[in-house]
Amino acid sequence: MNKKKFTLYSLLLLCIVLGSCKKFLAEYSQDAIRPTTTADLEALMYSDAYPYNTPFDTFDLLTDDIQCNGLAKGNDNLPVAGYSDILQVGMGMFKFDPQMFEGSSTIADRANVYIAYYTKIKGCNVVMDYLDKVSGSEASKNAILGQCLFLRSFYYLKLVTTYGKPYSGAGVNPEAALGVPLILSSQVKDGGVKRNTLKEVYDQVEKDLVKAADLLQNNFEPPTTFRVGASSANTLLSRFYLYRGLNTDWDKAIAYASRVLTVKSSLTNLSGYYATGFFINQGIYLSTGPEVLWGYGGSTTTESNPYFPSQQQFYPPYAVSASLANLYNRGDGVNTGNEGDLRYKTYFSTYDNGGVFLFKSNKAPSNVSYGGKGLRVAEVYLNRAEAYIKRFIQSGNAADRNAALSDLNYLRRNRYDTRNKAYVPVEITDGAALFKFCQDERRRELCLEDGHRWVDIKRWGLAVTHTFIAASGSATQHVLQSNSNLYALPIPYVAFLNNPQLVQNPQ
């Protein structure tokens, strides 16, 4: 596709997102802006439907994985010039301010994922609407359709878990509770679009993902981890059924996770990536690692953003919380018992001046490409283990308990230092205790990665307590109550400018 033609496609997409296309279409002939082949559509899909180069906040500042340290300080314990204002950025989220997106509390532009995801959804819709109008093989068209259905479902699941309440949350009626507007065509509609219910959104995501998995299985083998295939769709389906959380969903989560693990089951063995001197081998940070299914971007803490200074000699204003750091059996006298969890050493950047943690490292070998956004095999094991445990709690079937422990112990065996000491498998018989252990293991493994913790907090009905340290040094406590209205984040005010039918979430 030539540069001029590609630019016209992008302008067409932009005008669809922002408003009327009449003026644009009047200035350019239809022949000049229309894709004519599946190759044209693929190029448009890669640029405007896939999420690359688009910053998405994962809302880690809302979780218990992050703590506030006050002003950014250097090794001399003095404020660092140019970084004192970082404390203010993200303050609204960290303090659970209902006005966090209204401009009264400073917030990063990346937190406006509402507009960002809908822009990508428009890209998916444009590509799918053109499929019947271009030349190319049926298999090529099905491959494009499968990828676009997956991507649109991925964005809608992100949207509904950000701006809607948890599907199976306490007191939530999915047939009445508001989700997000479903826009399934690139046709521009005047007058705005109403929010669909949680059930309508989840039903659409399920329908599209099931179809995507089938189309991708039969028509497309991703050439790299930067493209989605059937295993990506099956992984997202296993995640979807955990998020929906109906009693009938556990069987489905297990089935789809098992489909993935039949094809790709290897995990990164962290012991194998440490040299004799216990220094990590610099040659292993590849997006083609053994457990990467799909990678599309860096974590909130590794991408360029105003929350975390990149200079590692600083005490940052926001850092990995002590409650998260202390979850690891790391062999230094904290949380002892089966010491040697290499994730503590591998996943975080740390300091010599007091052990302050900055962020989850973008060099963790088990991590997805560029450090934190995508799909990987570790999540699949955790999804299946949780579903097994839920089923065990329901039925008391010991086979489900054993299957869950098998998945959890396999993951942990690949994360512990086994060079000089054998890993000791965890054995838990009580259902509630096993579920709590699985929750903690999920937090240890997936922390600060693609927004997992924020969704988990909501679907499990957890409370979060934050202590904010102001520039003056004064500390104030802020609590997100269990099943809070803020589980459904406020829709950014800019979204209402182009859609008068939107209804804000109650706070």
Image (tube, grey):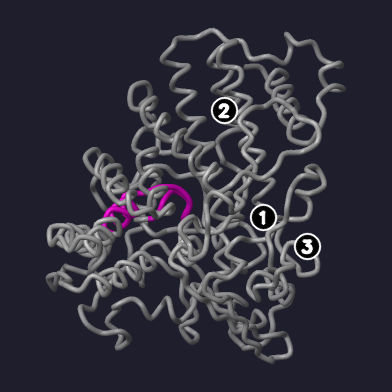
Report helix, strand or loop for mark 1. Answer: helix
Q: Is residue 282 shown to the viewer in this render?
A: yes
Q: Residue at x 64, y 60 (%)?
A: 305
Q: In this view, does 90 lie to the left or right of 430?
A: right
Q: Residue at x 54, y 16 (%)?
A: 39
Disc 1 residue type (three-letter): Arg
Q: Which residue is drawn at 66% across and 49% down?
A: 114
Q: Residue at x 58, y 49 (%)?
A: 159
Mark 2 or mark 1, which is nearer the start of the sequence? 2
Mark 1 or mark 3, which is nearer the start of the sequence? 3
Q: How far apart are marks 1 and 2 (CA)?
A: 22 Å
Residue, disc 1: 110
Q: Residue 45: give its label.
A: 2
Decide: few, some or many residues near mark 3? Use Cα within 10 Å; few <14, some 14-19, many ≥20: some
Q: Do the residues labelled 2 and 3 touch (CB within 8 Å)?
A: no
Disc 3 residue type (three-letter): Glu
Q: Is residue 74 placed above or below 461 in the rendered structure?
A: below
Report helix, strand or loop for mark 3. Answer: loop
Task: Please state the horizontal and vertical placement of residue 409, each as a whole percent of the image.
Answer: 19, 63
